[in-house]
Image (cartoon, helix red, strand yellow):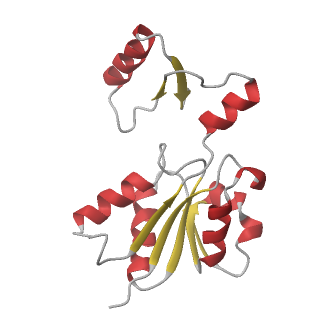
Amino acid sequence: MSFGKLYVVGVGPGHHDHMTFRAKQVIEESKIIVGYETYVSLISDLIDGKEVYRYPMTQEVDRANQAIDFAEKGHVVSLVSSGDPGIYGMIGLIYEILAEKGWKKNNGIYVECIPGVSSLNSCSALIGSPLMTDFAVVSMSDLLVPWEIIVKRVEAAALGDFVTVVYNPS
């Protein structure tokens, strides 16, 4: 059986100037692009002529499964995320699904996480507030974490006198 490649790609905060060289390289190599429709739109000029699968928000599991399925069929696939796929992105879900399937790094599809510039980096640079010392990052989304735990985390960051980056403030 011939396995393909799955790149989980961080495309950064939106402008191509903030994408890594490696991100552009693997998107060019990929024949299939899978992603949340907004993130795919950020790279629309880089994916002309490719098979593109766009998903609405909240269909992360479907996106991940489709990207894995294409790679298992021998295709080269980029699953795109904004920012960095390891910071509230898709790579964790990819590894969870693969682990459940019994995937082994040395005898299954090739998987590579392509890091990107996260909003915590880009925003701190834009507002002139560099993350110079220890800091904490907390998501206010209670979709996967109960609100009571989020409150404890915020309180712990405040007790530790950390600069705190807040994701999903709404």
Residue 93 appears left or right of 12: left
Number of numbered callouts drawn:
0
Residue 52 image position (x, y, % from top left): 61, 74
- Residue at 43% x, 16% y is 157
Image quarter (top left, top right, bottom left or bottom right) of the N terminus: bottom left
State which quadrant residue 26 falls in: bottom right
Farthest residue, direction front: 133
Farthest residue, direction bottom: 1
Residue 24 appears left or right of 74: right
User: Does residue 11 sit above or below 110 in this rendering?
Assistant: above
Residue 168 appears left or right of 15: left
User: Does residue 148 sit above or below 111 in this rendering?
Assistant: above
- Can residue 139 be seen here? The reply is no
- Residue at 38% x, 84% y is 3
- Residue at 59% x, 77% y is 30
Looking at the image, which is closer to me, 9 or 34?
Answer: 9
Image quarter (top left, top right, bottom left or bottom right) of the C terminus: top right
User: Does residue 48 sit above or below 40 in this rendering?
Assistant: below
- Residue at 44% x, 81% y is 4
Residue 36 image position (x, y, % from top left): 57, 58
Looking at the image, which is closer to me, 54 or 47?
Answer: 47
- Can residue 38 be seen here? The reply is yes
